[in-house]
Image: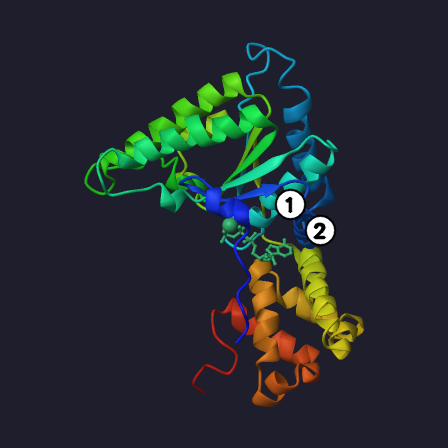
């Protein structure tokens, strides 16, 4: 049996609601950033907005530019939002060598509770204590993944379907964001959501940048597919040659409509297109990939449809 590696020490100390604390920069997150295919100018815009947060915010009065230090990434599931947010944290820290940046990853589900008033309390404690303490100690980036859980749209809530507690949790997030924005200019929240319509408008209004992360276009699909095949090629050298094959562009075109996660999973489906290929993945062909891409798009598993 493979031994599970020990949980890093810092995770034991992570306060409630914080899933993980990392020191930045972290080269693993840099690799993640590079692995996400996104228009270069969108990536540059993200890095620039994050940098500005740490260069200008502490120097210019909030009555001139009311920055809250929040960037929101919205888009369909599997388009790389969480990966981009983690990678962006690294890239930002890398721009300020020796500054001692830290990344706190919030686990919103750990804060929600069915007990009356508890979610609101947990949110307030997290922001006013844990996050504020970190920001007082040094530049801090906070990942708020699936932010609709914490900043749910209050206007869409019926009191039956959505307990008043969640309503109060959203209020608490907004109050805390305002307080932190006043006191800690060296704090940046990176939020993600695949349900932008479920995020409260007052939260969105506090965002300094809302960026839509789209499904990959044809060229991006080709780059993701190639990246995946070249990566597999490190283990199975024959697979690295597939992007040079005549049918590669046809496969890439067939991926249009899939998100980045689905493209990589589709490649795994192609490797599982027969027991022989599963035993020896180097047998996979561009035809297998094409069939798997087509099946992924129609929501079917390859070979799983009754004739
Ligand atoms: N644009 C992309 N380029 C390359 N790989 C991608 C891209 N988008 C997604 N992926 C792959 O999909 C995986 C999942 O991405 P990630 O979890 O960051 O997506 P997400 O947008 O946060 O999804 P969700 O909304 O479901 O949380 C990544 O590890 C990456 O391998
Ligand atoms: Mg995500």
The dot on residue 34 is 2
Among the two numbered marks 2 and 1 on one chain, the one whose residue lies closer to the N terminus: 2
Residue labelled 1 has its Cβ within 8 Å of some atom of ligand 1: no
Q: CA distance from mark 2 to mark 1?
A: 8 Å
Q: Is residue 256 above or below residue 38?
A: below
Residue 170: percent from the left, percent from the top?
Answer: 35, 31
Q: Is residue 137 above or below residue 221?
A: above
Q: Which residue is mark 1?
A: 87
Tag 1 secondary structure: helix
Instruction: Work out which residue is located at the far bottom of the displayed protein and give it.
Output: 276
The dot on residue 307 is none
In front of the other: 30 or 262: 30
Left or right? Give the position of 35 relative to 266.
Answer: right
In front of the other: 165 or 307: 165
Q: Taking the image as drawn, is residue 155 in sight?
A: no
Residue 178: percent from the left, percent from the top?
Answer: 45, 20
Q: Residue at x 65, y 25 (%)?
A: 54
Q: Residue at x 53, y 45 (%)?
A: 10
Q: Residues within 10 Å of mark 1 (few under 14, many from 20)?
A: many
Residue 162: percent from the left, percent from the top?
Answer: 25, 40
- Label pair 2/1, CB-CB below 8 angstroms: yes
Position of the C terminus by quadrant: bottom left
């Amino acid at each position: 049996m493979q031994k599970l590696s020990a949980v890093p020490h810092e995770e034991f100390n992570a306060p409630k609601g914080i899933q993980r604390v990392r020191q930045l920069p972290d080269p693993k997150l840099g690799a993640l950033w590079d692995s996400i295919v996104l228009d270069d100018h969108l990536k540059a815009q993200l890095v620039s907005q994050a940098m500005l947060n740490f260069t200008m915010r502490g120097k210019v009065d909030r009555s001139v530019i009311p920055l809250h230090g929040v960037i929101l990434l919205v888009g369909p599931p599997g388009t790389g939002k969480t990966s981009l947010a983690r990678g962006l944290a690294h890239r930002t820290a890398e721009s300020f060598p020796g500054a001692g940046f830290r990344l706190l990853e919030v686990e919103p589900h750990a804060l929600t509770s069915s007990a009356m008033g508890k979610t609101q309390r947990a949110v307030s404690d997290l922001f006013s204590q844990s996050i504020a303490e970190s920001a007082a100690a040094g530049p801090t980036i906070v990942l708020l993944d699936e932010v609709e859980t914490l900043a749910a749209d209050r206007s869409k809530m019926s009191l039956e379907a959505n307990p008043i507690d969640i309503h109060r949790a959203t209020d608490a997030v907004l109050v805390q964001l305002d307080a932190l924005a006043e006191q800690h200019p060296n704090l940046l929240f990176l939020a993600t959501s695949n349900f932008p319509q479920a995020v409260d408008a007052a939260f969105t209004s506090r965002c300094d940048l809302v960026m839509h992360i789209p499904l990959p276009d044809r060229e991006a699909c080709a780059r993701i597919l190639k990246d995946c095949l070249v990566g597999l090629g490190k283990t199975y050298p024959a697979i690295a040659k597939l992007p040079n094959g005549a049918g590669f562009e046809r496969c890439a075109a067939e991926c249009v409509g899939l998100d980045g996660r689905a493209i990589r999973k589709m490649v795994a489906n192609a490797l599982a297109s027969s027991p022989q290929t599963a035993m020896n993945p180097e047998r996979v062909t561009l035809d297998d990939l094409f069939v798997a891409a087509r099946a992924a798009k129609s929501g079917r598993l390859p070979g799983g449809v009754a004739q």
